[in-house]
Image (cartoon, rainbow, N blue to C red):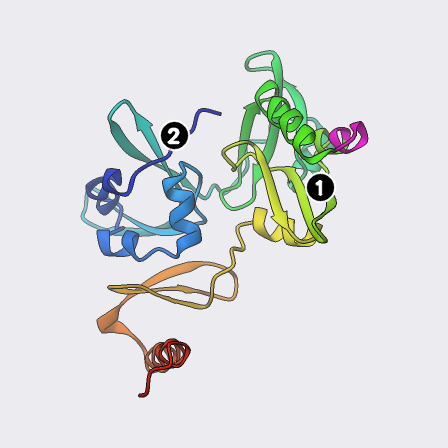
């Protein structure tokens, strides 16, 4: 998995702007999402806009991944599909993928072993050569002292939970990750939430120019500062008071 880290000064703001994502919106992204963007990984679903030939604006959601080609960085948009491309998989495999299972299969397109999973956010199949992920699993197993049973469970798409330094650590294959492996502090449920893109940030995430808001269903939207609602202003003031109190400032 050849993923290169992107520097902030390499972010292709002009290309992103064409899809309704301004520099202010990108710079205000919550830290977990910005880390994924700069890490060359897929972001959660973000709102985008496209203008057709008649000048009509179409609003949609897509995951975004930045790809570095030589000295150039370009955005790849992964929109939501109405149907997943599951036609190559027989019944039981298709059902397993739809349940969120990671499978190790031979793909007819290249007649080689691949790990595959259905990206629930975009409803599209992700595939990675199995030898790349298996190599990373082997390195991780050696570092963590995992036995063959643990490795077999991981290769079968299961989540393994270990005790390390009196803390729970859950590990599983997630092809959205740079290494193909996702490690999360906590149990298997915490791992699943992280994999599904339920990142640990609040309903309101105030930045320099505006605020990213998270709805109950996890969808993100951006509100410029001059469009804040009364509720948002109250929340921002409460956060400011907490920060000042934490620094021992009198207000």
Residue 120 lies, with reference to residue 135, above or below; the image says below
In the rendered image, the vertical position of residue 130 relative to residue 5, given as above or below = above
Q: Is residue 131 left or right of residue 249?
A: right
Residue range (magenta): 146-152
Q: Position of residue 147 (x, y in %)?
A: 78, 30
In this view, 140 is above or below 233: above
Instruction: Give me the residue at 59% from left, 40% from top.
Output: 182
Classify 10 Å Cα crowding around label 2: few (below 14), some (14-19), many (20 and above): some
Specify whether residue 148 is painted magenta. Answer: yes
Position of the C terminus, as image quadrant, is: bottom left
Q: State the residue at coordinates (38%, 49%).
A: 34
Q: Nearer the viewer, residue 229 or 202?
A: 202
Classify residue 42 as left or right of residue 87. Answer: left
- The first of marks 2 and 1 along the sequence is 2
User: Of tags 2 and 1, which is closer to the observer?
Assistant: 2
Compute the Cα span from label 2 to label 1.
Answer: 27 Å
Between 230 and 172, the one lying in front of the other is 172
In this view of the protein, which residue sits in the foreground, 178 or 78? 178
Specify few, some or many for label 1: CA neighbours under 10 Å numbering under 14, 14-19, or 20 or more: many
The x and y percentages for residue 47 are: 36, 53
Give residue 159's mark. 1
Q: Secondary structure at mark 2?
A: loop
Residue where numbered disc 2 is placed? 4
Magenta run includes residue 31: no
**Quarter of image, res 160:** top right
The answer to whether the residues at label 2 and label 1 have Cβ atoms under 8 Å apart is no
**Residue 141: percent from the left, percent from the top?**
69, 30
Q: Give the tally of numbered discs.
A: 2
Badge 1 marks a residue whose secondary structure is loop
Q: Main secondary structure of the magenta part?
A: helix
């Amino acid at each position: 998995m050849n993923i290169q880290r992107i520097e902030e000064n390499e972010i292709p703001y002009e290309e992103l702007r064409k899809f309704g994502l301004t520099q202010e919106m990108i710079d205000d992204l919550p830290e977990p999402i910005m880390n994924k963007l700069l890490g060359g990984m897929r972001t959660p679903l973000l709102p985008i806009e496209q203008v057709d030939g008649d000048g009509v604006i179409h609003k949609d959601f897509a995951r975004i991944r930045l790809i570095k080609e030589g000295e150039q960085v370009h955005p790849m948009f992964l929109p939501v599909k109405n149907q997943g491309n599951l036609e190559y998989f027989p019944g039981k495999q298709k059902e397993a993928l739809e349940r969120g299972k990671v499978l190790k299969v031979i793909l007819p397109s290249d007649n080689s072993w691949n790990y595959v999973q259905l990206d629930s956010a975009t409803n599209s199949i992700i595939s990675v050569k199995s030898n790349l992920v298996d190599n990373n699993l082997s390195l991780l197993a050696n570092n963590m002292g995992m036995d063959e049973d643990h490795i077999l469970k991981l290769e079968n798409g299961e989540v393994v939970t270990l005790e390390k330094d009196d803390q729970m650590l859950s590990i599983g294959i997630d092809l959205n990750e740079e290494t193909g492996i996702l490690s999360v502090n906590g149990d298997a449920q915490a791992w699943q939430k992280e994999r599904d893109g339920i990142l640990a940030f609040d309903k309101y995430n105030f930045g320099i120019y505006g605020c990213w808001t998270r709805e109950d269903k996890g969808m993100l939207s951006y509100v410029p500062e001059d469009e804040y609602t009364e509720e948002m202003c109250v929340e921002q003031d409460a956060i400011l008071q907490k920060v000042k109190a934490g620094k021992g400032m009198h207000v």
